[in-house]
């Protein structure tokens, strides 16, 4: 393994986890404010909300990229250059973004729903809106180059049809086998490229409005479609990257035969691309002017997105594990718990994506409930599983201290935290309120309880981070290029 | 049982069942005598059954729930009353067809809200006297969303914003009318 790739991977991991801690602390601050334990003014609250959301989306998107980049180097020739370039652009983009929120007081939310960024100049500095869009531009360029670069590297080894495993649809044992990691990474990368290209359109339209002195004005419905296509797709593709990592590592770590791409795995993941690109319509259910056909397709795509990725993956994992003696480590336990959390979050998402439920759940606390479930208890754990595995690779050490305590803290803290959101959603509490109106009598209690549960989760995460950090920094002091630096 | 309570119970039952199944799978890996344990027999056939079962469940749920979507409600009826709603940072203005402020809505009759915004996107969410969200739509500048509803329960209904609209989002129950009485 290329030492340069190891070092940039290690740098990414430490940076991602530090930003994750920061974002969790911002989240805890918000919940304590909503719980009336502390009091911060509304402008600061929404600045924190915007920073929390954008940081989480950014780090877990790149975390999946870091994982698949590292593991793809087993199959394709891909160096560290793309990852280094993306890292530099991400650091610059995130720094610019933090300037807009912490100094410029920009607080339009990470979804920056049009035309809010353009209509609130009295609440934040006038330079903050263009700088926000420039920070997105820097992040977007870094990630687009990275995603396209990885796809190009895959296409150098595999033909187009082989990349998407189409040969598995017609032959049981084709001459060229597409590894599941390659298939899932390619499917996810195509989705990421498409949503980043959409982000380019959003940025061009936004800059046109900013720099035309009011002569050019955008259409709110078009912008909402574009923004949610981008936001929904990147959040979902991040998760799929995590699943690609699980397909690659779970059998290896568990002492079971590697997953092979079969016709149903190939078919399922090809359909995933179609469904994930169209499921975003569920974000616009309450916009009745949206064409009816798109609303209907939104529920169809949201439902049937669960078949290819979720059901195929779930059954593959059950078949892999059930009734076989498994050597459990922190890595495959994190994968296993992460898959469970992802499915539970998926149930919450399916309930919300039913139009007749959405009318009373839309933008209540049910929404953060389900996406925190499949992020904090799903994707984060899948990626952490990769981090623990790769840290062991870097250090050559397999130590795994306080494993039960770490996992217990994550499970108790994580599920307690999201349960408070679900209870709030069931009581019709709106999301994104800095303080709750008095008539929501239990909302503050749910919020402060959620903050304490989040602290428990953070403790578990800290214990895991200390171990990962100690192992990852050893990669900088070595010039070896073999699989271990110890 | 109101919709919100039903979905919470449904979610919790599913979450507990999924956790239990995961635990049983985990236990099976501890009890197994060897790495090449018995495992699952005929996995391909079982996978197909599960896929068909899940697909069938989804189709049934869709066929039951889609007709209950707000787009199909009361489409054949003529509204007893039309209320124009103008959302803004940070208030809602509700007027009738003669542009007089509207404070009262007849119980048991279908009314139509024509909802728009004069600045950013807002959420127009109607809470019943028990503080339960009963219906909503978005207030988007340049567009008018038509929300049709029948309020059976008399009492005071509050309007809250459910789309983040800026620093005053949580206090959109401002000085202008943000409630109405159903009589």
Image (cartoon, grey):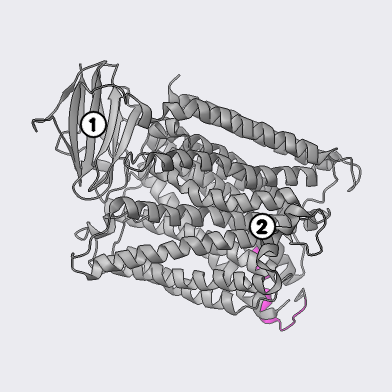
Percent coordinates x, y for residue A32 in the rendering:
40, 46
Cα gap from disc 1 to disc 2, whole angstroms: 47 Å
Which residue lies at the image location 45% right of the left edge and 68% below the top edge?
A140
Label 2's element? helix
Q: Chain of mark 2?
A: A
Q: Please report the bounds of the magenta region as a residue range.
A: A468-482
- A414 and B136: which one is in front? B136
Please name whichever residue, B45 or A357, is drawn nearer the observer in this view of the structure: B45
Q: Which residue is mark 2?
A: A244
Q: Residue at x 37, y 35 (%)?
A: A429
* Residue A287 visible, this orientation: yes
Q: Position of residue A243 (x, y in %)?
A: 65, 54
The residue drawn where x is 64% and y is 76% is A7
Mark 1 Cα shell of 10 Å, populated few (<14), some (14-19), many (≥20): many
Quadrant of the image occupied by residue A293: top left
* Residue A474 lies in the magenta-colored region: yes
Q: Is disc 2 on the same chain as disc 1? A: no
Magenta stretch: helix, strand or loop mostly = helix
Image quadrant where residue A76 sits: bottom right
The correct choice, above or below, for A57 with respect to B127 in the image is below
Q: Which residue is mark 1?
A: B113
- In front: mark 1 or mark 2? 1
């Amino acid at each position: 393994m290329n030492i340069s790739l190891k070092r940039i991977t290690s740098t990414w991991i430490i940076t991602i986890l530090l930003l994750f801690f920061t974002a969790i602390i911002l989240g805890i601050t918000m919940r304590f404010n909503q719980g009336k334990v502390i009091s911060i003014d509304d402008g600061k609250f929404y600045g924190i909300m915007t920073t929390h959301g954008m940081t989480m989306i950014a780090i877990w998107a790149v975390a999946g990229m870091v994982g698949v980049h590292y593991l793809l180097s087993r199959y394709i020739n891909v160096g560290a250059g793309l990852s280094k370039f993306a890292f530099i652009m991400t650091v610059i983009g995130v720094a610019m973004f933090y300037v807009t929120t912490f100094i410029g007081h920009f607080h339009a939310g990470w979804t920056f729903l049009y035309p809010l960024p353009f209509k609130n100049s009295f609440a934040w500095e006038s330079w903050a809106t263009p700088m926000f869009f420039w920070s997105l531009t820097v992040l977007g360029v870094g990630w687009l180059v990275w995603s396209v670069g990885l796809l190009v590297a895959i296409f150098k080894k595999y033909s187009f049809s082989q990349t998407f495993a189409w040969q598995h649809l017609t032959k049981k044992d084709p001459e060229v086998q597409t590894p599941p990691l390659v298939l899932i990474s390619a499917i996810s990368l195509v989705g990421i490229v498409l949503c980043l290209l959409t982000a380019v359109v959003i940025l061009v339209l936004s800059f046109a409005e900013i720099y035309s002195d009011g002569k050019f004005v955008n259409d709110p419905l078009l912008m909402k479609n574009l923004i949610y296509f981008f936001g929904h797709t990147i959040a979902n593709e991040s998760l799929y990257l995590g699943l690609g990592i699980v397909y690659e590592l779970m059998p290896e770590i568990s002492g079971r035969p590697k997953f092979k791409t079969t016709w149903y795995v190939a078919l399922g993941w090809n359909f995933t691309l179609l469904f994930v690109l169209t499921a975003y319509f569920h974000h616009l259910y309450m916009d009745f002017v949206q064409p009816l056909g798109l609303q209907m397709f939104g529920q169809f795509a949201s439902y049937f997105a669960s078949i290819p990725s979720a059901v195929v993956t779930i059954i593959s994992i059950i078949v892999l594990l059930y009734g076989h003696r498994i050597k459990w480590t922190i890595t495959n336990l994190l994968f296993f718990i992460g898959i469970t959390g992802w499915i539970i979050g998926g149930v919450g998402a399916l309930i919300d994506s039913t139009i007749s439920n959405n009318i009373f759940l839309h933008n209540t606390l049910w929404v953060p409930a389900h996406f925190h479930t499949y992020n904090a208890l799903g994707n984060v754990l899948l990626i952490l599983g990769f981090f623990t595995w790769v840290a062991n690779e870097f250090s050559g050490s397999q130590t795994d201290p306080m494993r039960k305590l770490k996992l217990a803290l994550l499970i108790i803290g994580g599920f307690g935290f999201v349960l408070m959101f679900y209870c709030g959603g069931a009581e019709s509490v709106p999301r994104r309120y800095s303080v709750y109106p008095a008539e929501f009598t239990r909302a503050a209690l749910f919020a402060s309880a959620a903050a304490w549960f989040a602290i428990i989760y953070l403790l578990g995460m800290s214990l895991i981070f200390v171990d990962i950090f100690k192992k990852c920094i050893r990669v900088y002091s070595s010039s070896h290029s073999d699989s271990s630096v110890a | 049982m109101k919709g919100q309570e039903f979905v919470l119970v449904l979610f919790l039952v599913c979450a507990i069942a999924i956790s239990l199944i995961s635990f049983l799978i985990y236990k099976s890996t501890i009890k197994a005598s060897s790495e090449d344990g018995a495992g699952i027999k005929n996995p391909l056939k079982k996978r197909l059954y599960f896929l068909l079962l899940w697909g069938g469940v989804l189709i049934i749920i869709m066929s039951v729930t889609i007709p209950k979507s707000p787009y199909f409600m009361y489409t054949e009826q003529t509204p007893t009353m039309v209320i124009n709603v103008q959302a803004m940072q940070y208030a809602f203005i509700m007027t009738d067809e003669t542009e007089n402020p509207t404070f009262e809505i007849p119980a048991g009759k279908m009314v139509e809200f024509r909802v728009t915004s004069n600045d950013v996107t807002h959420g127009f969410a109607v809470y019943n006297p028990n503080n339960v969200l009963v219906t909503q739509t978005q207030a988007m500048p340049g567009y008018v969303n038509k929300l049709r509803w029948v309020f059976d329960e008399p009492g005071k209904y509050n309007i809250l914003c459910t789309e983040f609209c800026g620093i005053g989002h949580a206090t959109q129950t401002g000085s202008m009318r943000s409630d109405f009485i159903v009589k």
